[in-house]
Image (spheres, rainbow, N blue to C red):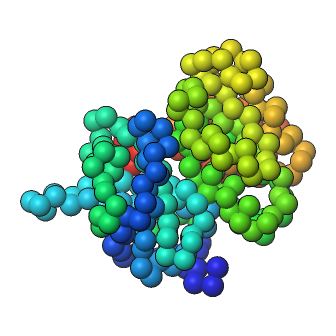
Amino acid sequence: MARAAVFGRLMVLRWLPGKVADIRVETPTSRTIVFDVPDWAGHLAGQHIDVRLTAEDGYSVQRSYSLAAPADEDRIEILVQKVTDGEVSPFLVDDLLPDDVIELRGPIGGWFTWEPSLGKPVSLVAGGSGIVPLMAMIRARTQAGSDAGFKLLYSVRGPADEYYAEELGKHGIEVTTIYTRSESPSGRPPGRIRPEDLSVLWPADAGARTYVCGPTGFVEAAAQALVDQGHDPGTIRTERFGPSGG
């Protein structure tokens, strides 16, 4: 990535205009939004951006959203899940239109990232929209032609809430989906993730790095179960989000 910013150190980031290039429906309450951002510095899979909206009276609010794909020149994308009483997500899902311009800042974050040069197998654990930064890693693997062994455990309410359902099967990785409110494709009864569900991932002695992303309770439970099963805490990287998506 010739134009990539210097990652892993503090940087002063400026707000940039992001022009909406495309909007895609992912589920009834979520949208993929693609932006053209002039002079985008590049990013790593797993990083995120800030989005800022400003009203006519000067009131502004911002939220953070994970980047959903590797950079494509000046083009980036995010996925937004609508939070009914939110200040930002309802506008982005219901009102944003192609060619609209909003303020973006990033890329942000250096810990929860993956690069093809990592050279070891990878386990991914996603809860709900926590799949988004992990999808960026999966897409980056495909883009780079990497043969790193990826295994994904994806927990979501049900088929209607599943992001990237068709695409996930096209990247040559092992995917296990768990539904919490209906029977899973494997026949597993509805329910939250359990320690035994993690057996589909790389075992503790495989030398894999594990990325866990989702709501706070989900992330804490999954990370603790992995440690209890003998995984080195230093190989587990976590990212969590609250109800506001901020």
Closer to us: 28 or 103: 28
Can see residue 53?
A: yes
Q: In the picture, residue 37 is in which quadrant?
A: bottom left
User: Residue drawn 41% across and 65% down?
Assistant: 21
Q: Is residue 134 above or below residue 48?
A: above
State which quadrant residue 178 falls in.
top right
Residue 73 x, y percent position in the rendering? 54, 77
Where residue 33 appears, as percent x and y from the top left, is 43, 56
Left or right, residue 100 beside residue 220: left
Left or right of residue 197, residue 86 in this image: left
Specify whether residue 233 is in view. Answer: no
- Residue sticking out furthest to the left: 57
Count of numbered circles on the image: 0
User: In the depicted view, which residue is nearer to us: 95 or 48?
Assistant: 95
| Residue at the spot 49% in from the left edge and 60% down from the top edge | 77
Q: Does 147 sit left or right of 132 as displayed? A: right
Classify 135 as above or below 106.
Answer: above
Quarter placement of the N terminus: bottom right
Task: Give the residue furthest to the top.
Answer: 189
Residue 221 sits in quarter: top right
Who's the residue at 84% across and 42% down the image? Answer: 202
Relative image position of residue 167 (x, y in whole percent): 66, 47
Percent of width and height locating residue 98? 34, 61
* Residue nearer the viewer, 211 or 135: 135
Q: Residue furthest bottom?
A: 2
Q: Is residue 228 above or below residue 134?
A: above
Q: Residue at x 16, y 58 (%)?
A: 55
